[in-house]
Amino acid sequence: MSQDSKLNKSQAAIKSGMDEKTARKYLNSGKLPSELKAERTWRTHNDAFSSVWNEIRGKLEVNPGLEAKTLFEYLQREYPGQFQDGQLRTLQRHIKRWRATEGPPKEVFFPQEHHPGILSQSDFTHMSSLEITIKGLPFDHLLYHFVLTYSNWETGSICFSESFESLSEGLQNALWTLGGVPVTHQTDRLSAAVQNTTDERGFTPRYQGLLRHYGLKGRKIQPRKANENGDVEQSHHRFKRAVEQSLMIRGSRDFESRSDYEAFLEKLFTQRNRGRQLRFDKDKAELKGLPLRRLDSVKHSQVRVTRNSTIRVNHNTYSVNSRLINEHVDVRLYMDHVEVWYAGSQVEKMPRLRGEDRHHINYRHIIDWLVRKPGAFANYCYRDDLFPSTNFRLVYDLLKRSGSVRYEKQYLKILYLASKEGESRVEAAILHLLEEEKRISFKAVEALVASELPEEIYNRARDIMISPVNIEQYDELITEGWSQ
C-alpha cells in the first residue's frame, strides 16, 4: 500500500470521527459497520416477570382484551412487595410482544373497489360544532348527508332528528337532486331504517316501502362497524371542515333565515362536486330512472283528544282546540312539523318537537275555559307555555307583586284579550304601559288595545332586541369572590 493511500485512509478516518485502526478493520473485512454488528440475543438483566409469565399468558389467552395495567395491579395484589410501580412499562412491552407474536389475529380492513352507479351511502351528522345562528339565535340542527361511493358526489338536507321522516325526506331530496337512482343504498343501523339494532331480520316496513318505491336495494353495516360506512363518514369530516373554512371567509356565522343558510350549503355542495365531474359522469350514466312521483315523508296516526285538550304524538304532547276534546283526530307527522286533521280538513299545524316528553301548548286552545277557572293556573303543569313572550311574563310578575288577590285572573283576562284581539296589539299595549311606567291592569291594557297606538310601538313589540352578554362582568364577580 502506497504512502499516499495510507495518508488518504488516515485522513478519511479522522474526518469521519473514527479511529484509524477501526477504519482499517472495516476495510479489511469488506463489510459495512451495520453488517459487522452482531444481533444481541442475551438479556442485560434478569426478567422480573419470568416466574409469573405463564400465569399472565394463561389469562391473556382466555381474555385477550386484558390491559397490562390491570394485570400489573393483579400481580401486586397477589405477590405483595415483589413488583414495583416502575416495572409496569416492562410488563407492557412483554404483553405487546405476546400480542404481536402469539395473540389473536387483528381485524383486517379490505379496501373496496367501487363501480359507477352501484353504491350510495348516507348518514346523519351533527352540525352544532359550527355554531350557526339564525338572526342571532343558535340554530341546532343535523345534516342528512348522501354520497355516491364511486365519484364521491355528495349532497345533504337540514334536519332536526334521526327520524324516519328525516331519512325519507333527505334520501328523496338527494335522489331527485341526483336525477337518478343507484343500485344500492347503505346506512348504519339507525332505528329509522333497521328493524332492531340487535336483530338481523332486516329493515322496518316503512323503510322497505321507501326502497321499493325507488327500486333500491337496502344494505346496512354490521353493529359497531362505522368503518363500513367509511365513504360518508369521511365526507362528514371533510364537508364540515369546508363549511368551517367558508364561514371564516364569509366573516360571519349568522344568517338572516334558514333558507339563506340552506342556499349557503347548496352552493358549497356545488363547488365541491365540480372537481368530481369526470367520475360523476360515469356514475350518472349507470343510474336508473326516477319514479313518477315522490313519496310523502309523513307518518299517519289516529289519536283521541284528551280531557286536557291535548294529544300525544311520538312521545310528545301537543295542545289542540278544546272543541275537539274526546274526538278522534288524524295526525300527520312530518320531518319538521305536525298537522292535525278532522273530518277531512286540517285544523292545526305546529312545529314538531325534538326529543321525547316535551310539550307544545298554545294558550289560544284552552284560554276560554282557563279564564273561567283561574284557580287552575297556579299549579297547571304546562303553565310556562302560557307566557307568549317575556313581556307577558313581566306583566304577570308585576301583577303578582302588586298585592292583588286576583292577579292570576287579571293576567288570564289579558291573555284572553290577546287571543281575541291579536297578540301583537296586546303586547304593544303592554310595552307602552311599561315604558310610561304606568300601573298594569286588565282595564288599562284593554283601553289601549281599543285605541290607536303609534305604529312605532307595534314595531318595538315585534322587534325585541336582547343585548349581548358582557362576559367581563362575570369575570369581575369571580375575581371579587376570590379576593374575599
Image: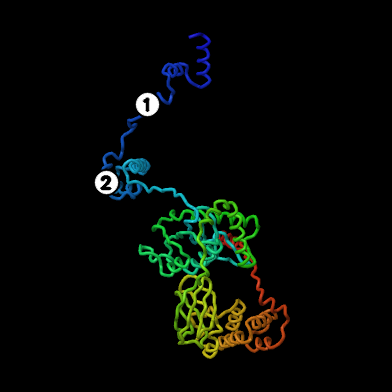
Amino acid bearing label 2: Gly
Amino acid bearing label 1: Ala
**Image point 53% across, 20% down: which residue?**
15
Q: Determine whether 469 is above or below 395 in the image.
A: above
| Residue 278 x/y as whole percent | 57, 51
Quick one: label 2, few (<14), some, or many (20+) residues within 10 Å?
few
Q: Determine whether 277 is above or below 214 in the image.
A: above
- Judging depth in this view, the residue of 208 and 145 nearest the camera is 208
Identify the residue under disc 1. Answer: 38
**Image point 46% across, 59% down: which residue?**
183
Q: Which mark is residue 438?
A: none
Q: Determine whether 106 is above or below 27 in the image.
A: below
Q: Determine whether 145 is above or below 366 in the image.
A: above
- Judging depth in this view, the residue of 215 and 329 nearest the camera is 215
| Residue 467 x/y as whole percent | 65, 68
Judge from the rendering whether residue 184 lies leftward or rightward of residue 73; answer left or right. Answer: right
The image quadrant of residue 421 is bottom right
Identify the residue under disc 2. Answer: 58
In the orientation shown, which residue stands out farthest toward the top? 2
Whichever of labels 1 and 2 marks the residue nearer the N terminus, that label is: 1
Judge from the rendering whether residue 253 lies leftward or rightward of residue 198; answer left or right. Answer: right
The image quadrant of residue 224 is bottom left
Quick one: label 1, few (<14), some, or many (20+) residues within 10 Å?
few
Secondary structure of the residue carrying numbered label 2: helix
Q: CA distance from mark 1 to mark 2?
A: 34 Å
